């Protein structure tokens, strides 16, 4: 009788141990996945800032097209010049959550961010970015990802960099 009780206890203990190991393993896999996503976002942001600075140092009238691979989960990038937004009109933004975020930022005074990222549900928010000297013709211009990429043209005009869609 004691042998049967000891055997069932060993079986239950082994099952609990297996569940614990699988739980810890799943947690670690999710941490690695999240770290990879954060690296992709940081790389995208750094590339965008580097290219923007490159054009800002060029002579007036210079314009360069760029193509960026969007990080997984990011499907839209919006450049905003809050001074030109009349009544915080962000109708050019297609993503509902991104539109609400930009509008609330505008209504709070605009702050110091001018590049916003639309993120698919299930992915963590990507912090907005500041590009010093950014100008946008109509106050806001958004780029939706096409096959995970966006195409942007940066144009230097008198020390300010205008962002526009390629023709």
Image (cartoon, rainbow, N blue to C red):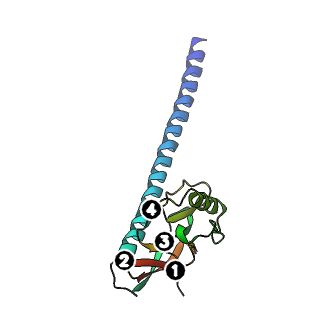
> Residue at label 4?
40
Residue 2 higher or lower than 128, as above or below: above
Q: CA distance from mark 2 to mark 3?
A: 22 Å
> Residue at label 1?
164
Q: Residue at x 55, y 34 (%)?
A: 19
Dot 2: within a 10 Å radius of its alpha carbon, few (fewer than 14), some, or many (20 or more) residues? many
Q: Of label 4 and label 2, which has the lower sequence position?
A: 4
Dot 1: within a 10 Å radius of its alpha carbon, few (fewer than 14), some, or many (20 or more) residues? many
Q: Of label 3 and label 4, which has the lower sequence position?
A: 4
Q: CA distance from mark 3 to mark 1?
A: 17 Å
Quadrant where the N terminus lies? top right
Q: CA distance from mark 4 to mark 2?
A: 24 Å
- As helix, strand or loop, the secondary structure at mark 4 comes to helix
Q: Quadrant of residue 12?
A: top right
- As helix, strand or loop, the secondary structure at mark 1 comes to strand
Residue 152 location, x and y as percent? Answer: 49, 78
Q: Of label 4 and label 1, which has the lower sequence position?
A: 4
> Residue at label 2?
56
Residue 36 location, x and y as percent? Answer: 45, 56
């Amino acid at each position: 009788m004691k042998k049967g009780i000891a055997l069932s206890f060993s079986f239950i203990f082994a099952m609990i141990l297996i569940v614990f190991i699988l739980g810890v393993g799943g947690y670690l896999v999710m941490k690695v996945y999240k770290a990879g996503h954060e690296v992709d976002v940081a790389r995208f942001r750094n590339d965008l800032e580097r290219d923007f600075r490159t054009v800002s140092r060029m002579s007036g009238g210079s314009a360069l097209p760029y193509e960026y691979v969007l990080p997984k989960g990011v499907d839209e990038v919006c450049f905003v010049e809050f001074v030109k937004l009349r009544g915080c009109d962000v109708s050019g933004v297609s993503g509902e959550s991104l539109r609400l975020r930009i509008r609330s930022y505008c209504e709070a005074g605009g702050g110091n961010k001018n590049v916003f990222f639309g993120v698919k549900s299930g992915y963590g928010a990507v912090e907005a970015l500041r590009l010093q000297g950014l100008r946008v013709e109509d106050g806001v211009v958004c780029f939706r990802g096409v096959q995970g990429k966006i195409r942007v043209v940066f144009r230097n005009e008198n020390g300010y960099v205008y962002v526009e869609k390629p023709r």
